[in-house]
Amino acid sequence: MTFNEKCYDLISQIPAGSISTYKEVAKALNTKAYRAVGSAMAKNPNPIIVPCHRVIKSNGDVGLFSYKEGTKTKITLLQKEGIDIAGEKVIGFKNKLFRFSSRI
DNA sequence: AGTCGAGCGCGCA
DNA sequence: TGCGCGCTCGACT
């Protein structure tokens, strides 16, 4: 189980309509390699089971996707999932933030 | 508030 | 072996 595999595993747990941030993922992995998370997504070998488009930046920005134009696709997908997005920013993403360790 | 620089983990050259 | 990335944070201006 490598760092990337863990990333995919966590992200694959994000239900439709919910989103998460790279920071949350890194935190769930107990690491500070935030960039590694995004880097792992970039090379996401399982784009089907890993909804990397549901992972955004911590500041509410959708961030990047595959390429500059890919970001637009990401936004469209999120909107279809019920996420409100203005320009390249997610509205109320904190309200739909999916926490991996939300074990109350 | 906006900008600059450093840090992590994996993959590629 | 060295650098970059779908990022984040702390400090300075």
Image (cartoon, coloured by chain):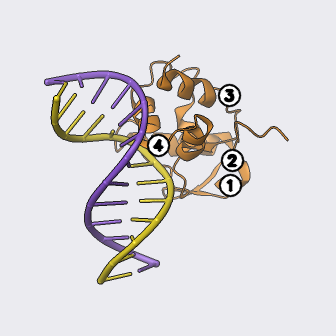
Chain colours: A orange, B purple, C yellow
Image-quadrant location for residue A51 = top right
What chain letter is assigned to the residue under label 1? A
Q: Nearer the viewer, mark 3 or mark 4?
A: 4
Q: Which residue does the image show at 48% across and 56% down from the upper left? A: A88
Mark 3 or mark 2, which has the lower sequence index? Answer: 3
Mark 3 or mark 4, which has the lower sequence index? Answer: 3
Please, what is the three-letter code of the amino acid marked with disc 1?
A: Lys
Mark 2 or mark 4, which has the lower sequence index? Answer: 4
The residue beneath circle 3 is A13
Give the percent coordinates (x, y) of residue A90. 58, 55
Give the percent coordinates (x, y) of residue A10. 62, 29
- Mark 2–mark 1 CB contact (< 8 Å): yes
Relative to A103, A27 lies left or right: left
What chain letter is assigned to the residue under label 4? A
Mark 4 or mark 1, which has the lower sequence index? Answer: 4
Real-space CA distance between mark 2 and mark 4, rounded to the nearest whole angstrom: 17 Å
Real-space CA distance between mark 4 and mark 1, rounded to the nearest whole angstrom: 18 Å
The residue beneath circle 2 is A97
Please, what is the three-letter code of the amino acid marked with disc 3?
A: Gln
Give the percent coordinates (x, y) of residue A24. 60, 44
Decide: is A43 above or below A39: above
Would you call the spot at circle 4 few (<14 residues within 10 Å), some (14-19), or many (20 or more)? Answer: some
The residue beneath circle 4 is A34
Q: Which residue does the image show at 71% across and 32% down from the upper left? A: A15
Real-space CA distance between mark 1 and mark 3, rounded to the nearest whole angstrom: 17 Å
